Amino acid sequence: MLKSIGFYKVKIAIFISGNGSNLKNLINHSLKKNSRFKITLIISNNPKAKGLNFARKFKIKKKIINYSNVKYTEKRILIELKKNKIKLICLAGFMKILSKNFIRIFKGKIINIHPSLLPKYKGLNTHQRAIDNKEKYSGCTVHYVNSKLDSGRIILQKKVKILKNDTSKSLSKRVLKHEHVLYPKALKKILSNL
Ligand code: GRF
């Protein structure tokens, strides 16, 4: 159970691999007056992730973790999480798969944003596959992470209409804007469900 009582803010770690637009957006939300969470750690497997610039900008602790040995790497991550009293992990464009063991240790405390209407289109290239299949809608989903890829319990979902001339690029750009609304909303929902 996540604790956020009175002025106590839940400490969150965000895991990224790339641009970090969701990270930036969550940081901005965390800085709002009534926010119930605080981002105190950013973890990236990619030293070149653009999102790491936000760690510098907002003075948030960052750790770049080399993923060559999963067992060792996850051990290091767990030490960092413990040291920083992290209560919730938000994956935001994190391109590595966490082991079953790791997920078990943080059971119910890892969430992810995925650019599709889950359970449809798990995995990569979601928008292209939705367009190829002539779907009317794509979208995004915030869900709990369990040991099966993109299969954990859904927290919130947003449908986004696929337009006639949409390419994967135009669609992902439009969906990303909705992701920036959905992720903080989902966080609010789980943090107030205490
Ligand atoms: C987002 O589309 C998210 O749904 C997916 O990876 C992308 C990350 O984008 N998991 P950003 O790095 O937050 O800009």
Image (spheres, rainbow, N blue to C red):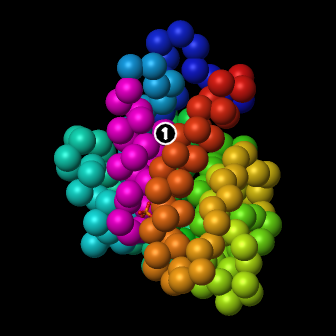
Q: Report which quarter residue 98 is drawn in.
A: bottom right
Residue 125 at x, y = what percent?
59, 82
Q: Report which quarter residue 163 is drawn in.
A: bottom right
Q: Is residue 111 left or right of residue 77?
A: right
Q: Is residue 82 left or right of residue 58?
A: right
In this rendering, the answer to whether 185 lies above or below 42 is above
Identity of the residue furthest to the bottom in this view: 132
Residue that numbered label 1 is attached to: 12
Closer to the camera in the image, 163 or 87: 163
Q: Is residue 172 left or right of residue 3?
A: left
Residue 168 at x, y = what percent?
52, 81
Residue 183 visible in the snapshot: yes
Residue 76 visible in the snapshot: no
Residue 69 at x, y = what percent?
50, 76
In this rendering, the answer to whether 163 lies above or below 60 is below
Closer to the camera in the image, 90 or 173: 173
In this rendering, the answer to whether 129 lies above or below 77 is below
Quadrant for the N terminus, please: top right
- Which residue is rendered at x = 47% and y = 12% of the image? 7
Which region shows up in magenta? 12-32
Identity of the residue furthest to the front in this view: 164
- Which residue is rendered at x = 54% and y = 83% of the image? 165
Residue 115 at x, y = what percent?
60, 66
Secondary structure of the residue carrying numbered label 1: strand
Closer to the camera in the image, 161 or 18: 161
- Which residue is rendered at x = 53% and y = 10% of the image? 6
Quadrant for the C terminus, please: top right
Look at label 1 and name its amino acid.
Ile
Identity of the residue furthest to the left in this view: 57
10 Å crowding of disc 1: few (<14), some (14-19), many (20+): many
